[in-house]
Image (cartoon, grey):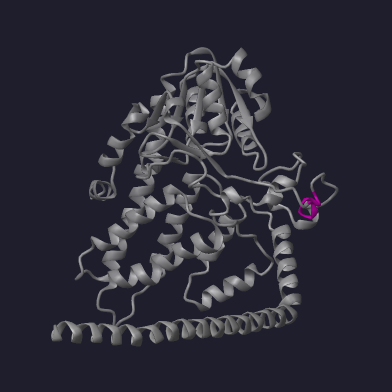
Amino acid sequence: ALQEAQRAAKAEGGGSKSKPKKGGGADSGAASGKGAASNNKKASGADDKRSTAEGSAYGGGSESAGSSASENKKDDKTVSLFSHLPQPKHPTDQHLSSISSTIDNNLHPAVPTLGHLYQTHSLLGGNARCRAMLQTFALLLQSYTPPPDTRDFRVDVDHSLLKPAFQYWTTQCRPHSVSMGNAFSFLKLAVANLERDLEWNEARDILLESLEAYVTERIEYAGKAISRHAGSKIQDKGDVILVFGRSEVINRLLLDAALTDGKTFRVIVVDSRPLLEGRDTLEILSRAGISCTYVLLNALSYLMMREVTKVFLGASALMSNGSVLSRVGTACVALLANSNHIPVLVGCETYKICNRVQLESITGNELGDAEEVAFTDCARVGPSNRWGEEQKNDGSVLSDWKSKPNLKLLNLMYDLTPSSAVTGIVTEVGILPPSSVAVLLREMNPDSAFKGTD
């Protein structure tokens, strides 16, 4: 009984002590709540004052930033879908000064000179650009002597001679073509395969012979073989052949078929702005006595349905999946011919085969100068960007296109023709289906190509 009474007394005393604690906890909670509320009010007031001060201090800046952003957006004439592509380089009057500056940077004068031809489109075509590049490399090798203290002349040639020139052409002038890239890889491999103990004069002779063999075998002999294979598909009389733009290998096979084989046929030359390369094809074929018809791309559907029997097209590159990368407008010609059940033969050398897989013309392409599209006078001769700015704006309809806020001009250089629209690809090894491009890529890789020149 005594223990129970003690337990009851302890329980009563503990309960009485805990009650003030509960009350004190409530009071302290209320006090802390009031303090927190007052602190929140102070903080919110400070934030309001700070935001007001910031608004008063930066209000004009935000308006100016917004206006400048809107002005930049207004001045930006780049089509957003192709904004990832490098913008075209515009030739300027400071070209001579750039040549002198590149000379100071240990670049041979022939490098910026060729770059200017690339930049102004005075040199067009995959074969012509690649041939000029290799000839320039041969000139550089002839005038180059490695430093006397060099440990390996192969590294010095690669890093001091080849790479600076190629990077200058690619970054300062115009993106390189697939043919140029493959030829440059071949040259680098040729340098790497040289013996380290060779004398420079002997090594230089080997490299010059390799360059000459590459041009002769992969470009010149390949063009003759393509002419022989494709010429067998032209009838002796009555064929109407359609070509687009200008292609060195297509012009050669047509000339060989008419002048060497004595075949009689008519050629329809389809052309498009702004480069109008088909005029060169028209001039070459007309001088050879070949009957020609010259039309623009918008008249293609009428001609294709009525009289065309075969279509011959050139190529800038062959993708590993059989697609053909060529001058913009080629895909329109191939697709229309395919829909009308007209055979489409693409002439292309094997050194233009690329290991990439491309399904559309957006991911990989090249942008041309939009001013070429703005100039609507088709009476000019040659590439449209050879004339000056004062001639471009002589009353053209689109001379003030940059001042139009909702107008953007796009000048794509290439398009991609799907393999399904191509009947056959004519190479130096024969006429093959587009599905065999991957096999050619494996057989004609740079290693085997270099070993074949030994």
Tell me which segment is drawn in magenta: 399-404
Q: Is residue 403 magenta?
A: yes
Seen at 29% across and 87% down, the residue is 13
Q: Is residue 200 left or right of residue 245?
A: left
**Camera sees residue 69:** yes
Q: Nearer the viewer, residue 129 or 258?
A: 129
Q: Quadrant of the N terminus?
A: bottom left
Instruction: Answer whether residue 142 is visible to the viewer in this image.
Output: no
Residue at the location (69% across, 59% down)? 73
The picture places residue 323, in percent across and down from the top left corner, at 42, 35
Nearer to us in this view, 399 or 296 = 399
Q: Is residue 445 above or below residue 271?
A: below
Q: Position of residue 255 (x, y in %)?
A: 51, 28
At a point 68% along the width and 24% down the height, the residue shown is: 299
Picture mark count: 0
The quadrant in which residue 67 appears is: bottom right
Residue 184 in the figure: left or right of residue 308: left
Residue 282: where, in percent of width, then height? Answer: 63, 31
Q: Position of residue 374 (x, y in %)?
A: 74, 47
- 67 to 42, vertically: above or below: above
Q: Is residue 198 above or below residue 432?
A: below
Using the image as rendered, state which of residue 286 and residue 8 is in the foreground: 8
* 195 part of magenta stretch: no
